């Protein structure tokens, strides 16, 4: 869209998640970058940057509110799924292909390796990511 810019990045021939970037006028040109793993390894590690600064540090649960009081971004990292915080529709997604790592919902509800990340932007845009190990 002209207002919401999302770019994904995959690795391996299987298309494994490597990262995603979100920016655009709907968040005032700010940027969120979520990167998976390191050096091609499937570590379950997720690194998150807001405007180039790392947020939601590795190993700890936490929250981030953008400097504008959260109007641009509210983000959280949890070990487990929190029903009151996360969009329950994510669990109902029916994948077009079968994955070798188990049912879709288990990627979010069984304490995924690397944690569970939730990002809430303006205009009802939400993003959920996990460090599930492929």
Image (cartoon, grey):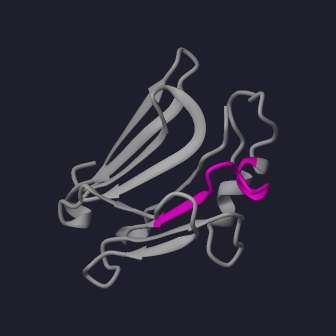
Q: Where's residue 91, x and y in %?
A: 72, 55
Please name the residue shown 35% across and 80% down the image: 70
Q: Where's residue 129, x and y in %?
A: 56, 52
Please name the residue shown 62% across and 75% down the image: 85
Residue furthest out toward the bottom: 69
Q: Where's residue 79, x and y in %?
A: 68, 63
Viewer-nearest residue: 68 or 121: 68
The answer to whether 39 appears left or right of 130 in the picture is: left
Classify 4 as above or below 36: below
Q: Where's residue 93, x and y in %?
A: 69, 48
Residue furthest out toward the top: 13
Residue 42: which quarter of the image?
top right
Viewer-nearest residue: 62 or 18: 62
Residue 80: which quarter of the image?
bottom right
Residue 66: which quarter of the image?
bottom left
- Residue 100 on the magenta span: no
Q: Which residues are magenta?
A: 107-119
Classify 84 as above or below 107: below
Please name the residue shown 46% across and 64% down the image: 56
Classify 12 as above or below 124: above
Please name the residue shown 25% across and 65% down the image: 27
- Residue 117 on the magenta span: yes
Which quadrant is the C terminus positioned in? top right
The answer to whether 9 appears left or right of 110 in the picture is: left
Classify 83 as above or below 47: below
Q: How many marks?
A: 0
């Amino acid at each position: 869209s002209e207002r919401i810019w999302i770019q994904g990045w995959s690795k391996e021939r299987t298309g494994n998640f490597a990262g995603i970037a979100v920016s655009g006028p709907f968040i005032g040109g700010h940027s969120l970058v979520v990167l998976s793993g390191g050096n091609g390894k499937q570590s379950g590690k997720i690194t998150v940057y807001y405007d180039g600064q790392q947020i939601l540090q590795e190993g700890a649960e936490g929250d981030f509110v953008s400097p504008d009081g959260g109007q641009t971004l509210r983000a959280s990292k949890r070990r487990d799924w929190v029903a009151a915080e996360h969009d329950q529709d994510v669990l109902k997604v029916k994948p077009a292909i079968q994955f070798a790592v188990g049912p879709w919902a288990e990627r979010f509800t069984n304490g995924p390796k690397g944690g569970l990340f939730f990002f809430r932007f303006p205009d009802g845009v939400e993003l959920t990511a996990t460090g599930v190990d492929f």
